[in-house]
Each structure stands twice: as C-alpha cells, then as structure tokens.
Amino acid sequence: MFFSIIPGMRAARRIGAAERKQKAGDLAGVMTVCAEALEILGAPGVELEMPWCRSAAPMALAGYCQAGRQLERREDVLRMLTRWRPTYLAWMKESLAPQEAAWFQWFEEALGALSSDPRP
C-alpha cells in the first residue's frame, strides 16, 4: 500500500498539470502529462486498486484520449486505450462514480470506432 501512495501523488500532480495545460489550450501538453501519469500508475508495484490510483487512472486516460481525439492522433489514442483496456474493463463491473462509468463507456466506444476505422 505505501508504495502506491507516492506514485499516486505523482500521478495526481501530473493530472493537475494536464488541467492547467488544457485551460491554456495546449492539447499536446495535455497528452504528454496524462501519458506521464499513466506511466507512473502502470509501473510495476503500483497497486491500482488503491483509491487514489483507481481514481487517477481513468481521469488521466480520459484526458489523454480527449486531447488525442481533438489533435487527430488516433494511433496514439488507440494504443493507449488498448494498453489500459484490461484494467478499465475490470473496473467497469463496479464503477465508483457516474463520471467513471461514463468514461469507461466512452473508452469502449472510442476503441471500437478507432479499431474499425480503415484510415492509416
């Protein structure tokens, strides 16, 4: 548990940075810092079931994907959704909040749309 507190705090700081970048209109920056948060949370030894990690991961994934969609970086979004899909599918069964459930549904819809899109 202790080993997940510090990564969770680091990820939360990255999410805060993403929110500031979004307000400034820096969508590429949003993607970068959200990817950093997801990398922190996806590291070996981080317990994603800890509440602070559990809430941070979908938030960072949503920020990354929404910015990526606006920037038309479909391959990056597809890769990140595919990477995190096993995790969020497990969480989908018991969403913690309505916003989280909406994100999970959006992830699945976006993944389906991106996977079936024949564009390179």
Image: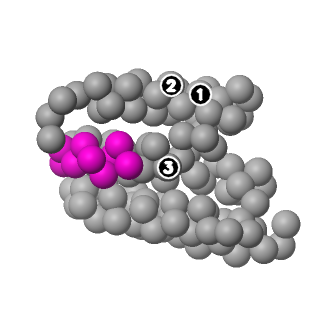
Is residue 64 placed above or below 85 in the rendered structure? Answer: below
Q: Which residue is outermost to the right? A: 1
Question: Residue visible at 49% across and 49% down?
Answer: 83
Q: What residue type is labelled 1?
A: Ala
Number of callouts: 3
Secondary structure under badge 2? helix
- Can residue 87 be seen from the camera position used here? yes
Q: Is residue 92 found left or right of 27 in the rendered image?
A: right
- In the image, residue 70 sits, relative to residue 18, either above or below, namely above
Mark 3 vs mark 2: in front: 3
> Quick one: label 3, few (<14), some, or many (20+) residues within 10 Å?
few
Q: In which quarter of the image is the C terminus?
A: top left
Q: Is residue 16 visible?
A: no
Q: Where is residue 101 in the image (x, y as percent from the top left)?
A: 59, 28
Is residue 50 inside the magenta stretch? no
| Mark before the other along the chain sequence, 3 or 1 | 3
Classify mark 1: helix, strand or loop: helix
The kind of residue on which mark 2 rests is Gln
Q: How far apart are labels 2 and 1 at the CA level?
A: 6 Å
Determine the secondary structure under disc 3.
helix
Region in magenta: 71-79
As for residue 77 lying within the magenta part, the answer is: yes
Judged left or right of residue 11, residue 95 is: right
Q: Distance between the residues labelled 3 and 2?
A: 16 Å
- Sequence-first tag of 3 and 2: 3
State how far apart marks 3 and 1 are (Cα).
Answer: 19 Å
Provide the residue designation for mark 1.
Answer: 101
- Disc 3 target residue: 83
Q: Where's the N terminus, which quadrant?
A: bottom right
Which secondary structure is most common in the magenta stretch? helix
Give the numbered dot on residue 105: 2
Q: Measuring 25% from the left and 43% from the top, which residue is drawn there?
A: 74
